[in-house]
Image (spheres, rainbow, N blue to C red):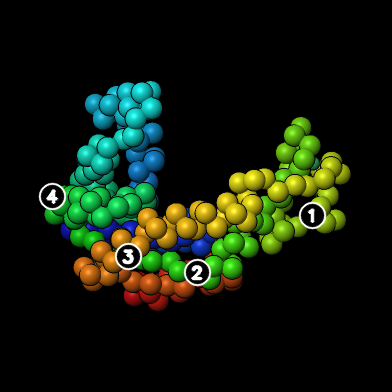
């Protein structure tokens, strides 16, 4: 019986980086439903063909299809011995019910659901910090928090003006955080009730420091 982990966290909180550090240190396998879908399509499996069909028709991939794919993956030997960090599933409480059934069927157990919390101002600052070169032929990318250009607002590479994409605007960041809150609140309630939820605070420090907080939370 292997340990399955789920991480929940808002955009900008460093969920991907923390997941990578966690898997690298513990040997737990990172399983992303997006990657599983791409793999199934590449293999032209039965599920892969169904998914390709749905995408071609512009239809949503049903929970049942995703659940079948996750179930197949969690039954495999490597996961049975090393465990996994499940990424992209569950996103809703019906999916959480499905996961609980899949875990019973595949002889795995939910070790913890980690909720990565972060200060809203920090998230907005991170989500709005990207600047791109306005010269499309150049395309250089900077970050006003972590990768500043030598001269404010000017591309190091070609000297063109740096601009903020609308995807990186404050209103988009606020909207993304709002969507995250609305989607995640039911899961937080669900896993609080089941006793699986553990919380950590992501702070504006080096990833390794946040990783220590993660280890403390999961210990
Ligand atoms: Zn440039």
Please provide percent x and percent y for residue 119. 53, 71
Against 76, residue 118 (above or below) is below
> Mark 3 = which residue?
188
CB atoms of marks 2 and 4 within 8 Å? no
CB atoms of marks 3 and 4 within 8 Å? no
At 57% from the left and 55% from the top, the residue drawn is: 173
Circle nearer the N terminus (2, 4): 4
Which image quarter holds the C terminus?
Answer: bottom left
* Residue situated in front as seen by the camera: 10 or 204: 10
Ligand 1, what quadrant? Answer: top right
> Mark 1 = which residue?
149
Which image quarter holds the N terminus?
Answer: bottom left
Circle nearer the N terminus (3, 1): 1
Please provide percent x and percent y for residue 95. 25, 50
How busy is the neighbourhood of tag 3: few (under 14 within 10 Å), some, or many (20 plus)? Answer: many
The mark lying in front, picked from 3 and 4, is 3
> Mark 2 = which residue?
118
Answer yes or no: is residue 81 visible.
no
The mark lying in front, picked from 3 and 1, is 3
Answer yes or no: is residue 47 visible.
yes
Tell me the quarter of the picture where residue 148 sits: bottom right
Circle nearer the N terminus (3, 4): 4
Circle nearer the N terminus (1, 2): 2
Q: Marks 2/4: CA distance?
A: 35 Å
> Mark 4 = which residue?
105
Q: Marks 3/1: CA distance?
A: 39 Å
At 27% from the left and 37% from the top, the residue drawn is: 62
Q: Marks 4/1: CA distance?
A: 53 Å
Q: Marks 3/4: CA distance?
A: 24 Å
How busy is the neighbourhood of tag 2: few (under 14 within 10 Å), some, or many (20 plus)? Answer: some
């Amino acid at each position: 019986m292997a340990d399955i982990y789920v991480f929940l966290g808002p955009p900008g909180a460093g969920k991907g980086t923390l997941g990578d550090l966690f898997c690298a240190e513990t040997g737990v396998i990172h399983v992303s439903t997006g990657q599983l879908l791409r793999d199934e399509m590449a293999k032209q499996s039965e599920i892969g063909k169904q998914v390709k069909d749905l995408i071609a028709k512009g239809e949503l991939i049903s929970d049942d299809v995703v659940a079948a794919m996750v179930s197949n993956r969690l039954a495999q030997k490597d996961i049975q011995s090393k465990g996994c960090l499940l990424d992209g599933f569950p996103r809703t409480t019906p999916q959480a019910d499905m996961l609980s059934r899949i875990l019973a069927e595949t002889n795995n157990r939910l070790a913890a659901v980690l909720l990565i919390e972060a200060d809203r101002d920090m998230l907005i600052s991170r989500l709005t910090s990207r600047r791109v070169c306005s010269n499309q032929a150049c395309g250089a990318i900077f970050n006003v928090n972590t990768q500043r250009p030598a001269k404010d607002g000017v591309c190091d590479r070609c000297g063109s003006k740096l601009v903020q994409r609308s995807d990186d605007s404050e209103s988009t960041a606020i909207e993304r955080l709002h969507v995250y809150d609305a989607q995640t609140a039911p899961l937080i309630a669900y896993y609080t009730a089941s006793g699986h939820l553990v919380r950590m605070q992501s702070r504006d420090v080096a990833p390794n420091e946040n990783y220590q907080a993660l280890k403390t939370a999961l210990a």
